[in-house]
Image: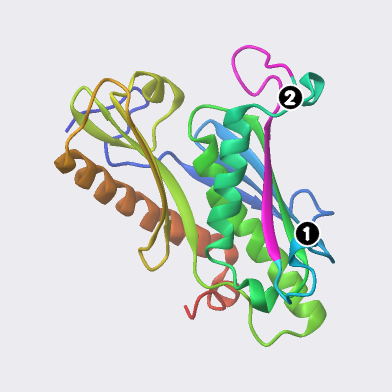
Amino acid sequence: MSIRLDGRSPDQLRPVKMRLGYPKHAEGAVLIETGDTHVLCTASVEERVPLWLRGTGQGWVTAEYGMLPRSTATRNEREASRGKLGGRTQEIQRLVGRSMRAVTDLKKLGERTIWLDCDVLQADGGTRTASVTGSFIALTLALDHLAKKLEWPELPILDYAAAVSVGVMDGVPMLDLCYEEDSKALVDMNVVMTGKGGLIEVQGTGEGGPFTEAQLHELLQLAKQGIASLLEIQKQYLGPELAAKIGGQ
């Protein structure tokens, strides 16, 4: 089996650590570390919905994403100073929002909005997948906060959700790519899945040319394996009592 630059096997995740409840002011918050990628994910509750949802009885979950100027090897200009969001930023925050809405019962949430803010403190590949995985923790904590405050009998969460990257390096399928691997991969793919194995999103590109259906299947199986591990990590950090409230678990 091939050994990677950081000593991992091709089917091995980077070490994952989480610090829940940081920062303290948000209804839900977590600092997630996947190897050298560190993302701060917070969930804030707003007692209103966008204009087009008013009067429907339905809530909304949306996301914003950003990278600190020195989260990368060279300084990136703040997008706020340019006066507009880049295409990549818009794509990622929409991905996070879609992913979290897919596992939230928006009717049970009621007419309120959950804002998810994903701020990349340090980037080494996989910032969007770490944002999705961390946002689920932040969302769960915020909804648990609401449930206790409003005395809901259950959380409006349909299932777990997590994401991971996969790719092909020198003909070998790899799980959870760091930046150096991602920049050289012939195939690069991001996968978001639920706890029950449903696919929320698959973003795949043949960077070095077309790839086969067999390779696609192999990469999806590898992503499924990695996400299963991430789901177990999520449950460990949430704790058995809170974890048991999600999606009938």
Quadrant of the rendered structure where residue 84 is?
A: top right
Q: Nearer the viewer, residue 16 or 72?
A: 72
The magenta stretch spans residue 75: yes
> Could you tell me which secondary element the residue under label 1 belongs to?
loop
Q: Residue furthest top?
A: 74
Q: Residue furthest front?
A: 52
Q: Nearer the viewer, mark 2 or mark 1?
A: 1
Q: Is residue 84 above or below residue 138?
A: above
Q: Amino acid at mark 2?
A: Glu
Q: Amino acid at mark 1?
A: Pro
- The stretch of residues the image draws in magenta is 60-77
Question: Circle 2 sits on which residue?
Answer: 79
**Alpha carbon of mark 2 to alpha carbon of mark 1: how far?**
24 Å
Residue for point 68% across, 53% down? 62
Q: Position of residue 156 (x, y in %)?
A: 62, 75
Residue for point 54% across, 46% down? 95
Residue for point 53% across, 30% down? 36
The reply, left or right, for residue 46 in relation to residue 165 is right
Q: Nearer the viewer, residue 84 or 175?
A: 84
Q: Position of residue 67 (x, y in %)?
A: 67, 29
Q: Is residue 131 above or below residue 61?
A: above
Specify which label sits upstream in the sequence, 2 or 1: 1
* Label of residue 9 in the image: none
Q: Is residue 234 above or below residue 117?
A: below
Q: Position of residue 171 (x, y in %)?
A: 18, 26
Q: Nearer the viewer, residue 203 or 166?
A: 203
> Could you tell me which secondary element the residue under label 2 belongs to?
helix
**Quadrant position of the N terminus in the picture:** top left
Question: Circle 1 sits on which residue?
Answer: 50
